[in-house]
Amino acid sequence: MLNKVFIIGRLTGDPVITYLPSGTPVVEFTLAYNRRYKNQNGEFQEESHFFDVKAYGKMAEDWATRFSKGYLVLVEGRLSQEKWEKEGKKFSKVRIIAENVRLINRPKGAELQAEEEEEVPPIEEEIEKLGKEEEKPFTDEEDEIPF
């Protein structure tokens, strides 16, 4: 089954890094996305959406030091649903597990870090590459739908 997400948005705060008992780094941040559309009266409206993002491993540690509040990034990843129970009530949350994060733009006044001084390809090239990835065709032999 296909579970792939691409989203462009701004970090709402600095990434927070923690470590699992195994020593694996985990970074978490929230991404804000603004959707602009025309309503029934032809007037432009804007609504904001916020997505929690989590990443694991060495790359997560790098992202925690390279990105901060206000940075515009492209996140490539997958959706994951976390479920838990508290005081007899069931809760769930869907978040993005990042597999890749690309810098698109820094906020005004943000200083370059030494690693960021390398040339970053234009985002249009990255988006074009994403559209060319081949997907495995669906067959009846795959798992049944889980609902």
Image: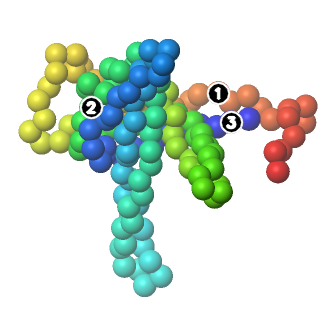
Q: In the rendering, at what x and y percent does residue 64 appear? A: 31, 27
Query: Mark 3 or 1 closer to N-term?
Result: 3
Type of amino acid at the residue the image marks with label 1: Glu
Type of amino acid at the residue the image marks with label 2: Phe
- Quadrant of the rendered image containing residue 30: top left
Residue visible at 64% across and 37% down in the picture: 3
Residue furthest right in the image:
141
With 91 as the anchor, is 110 left or right in this view? left
User: Label 2 vs label 3: CA separation?
Assistant: 28 Å
With 61 as the anchor, is 86 left or right in this view? right
Question: Residue 63, labelled with which disc?
Answer: none
> Which residue is labeled 3 in the image?
2
Contact between marks 3 and 1 (CB within 8 A): the answer is no
Residue furthest left in the image:
109
> Which residue is labeled 1 in the image?
134
Query: Mark 1 or 2 closer to N-term?
Result: 2
The answer, for residue 91, to whether it is visible in the render is no
Type of amino acid at the residue the image marks with label 3: Leu
Q: In the rendering, at what x and y percent does residue 146 appear? A: 81, 45
User: Label 1 vs label 2: CA separation?
Assistant: 30 Å
Query: Mark 2 or 3 closer to N-term?
Result: 3
Check disc 2 and report its element: helix, strand or loop: loop
Quadrant for the N terminus, please: top right
- Location of residue 19 with respect to 33 vertically, above or below: above
Residue visible at 80% across and 35% down in the picture: 138
> Which residue is labeled 2 in the image?
67
The answer, for residue 140, to whether it is visible in the render is yes
Check disc 3 and report its element: helix, strand or loop: loop
Residue visible at 35% across and 28% down in the picture: 17
Question: Closer to the observer: label 3 or label 1?
Answer: 3
* Mark 1 surroundings: few (<14), some (14-19) or many (≥20) residues within 10 A: few
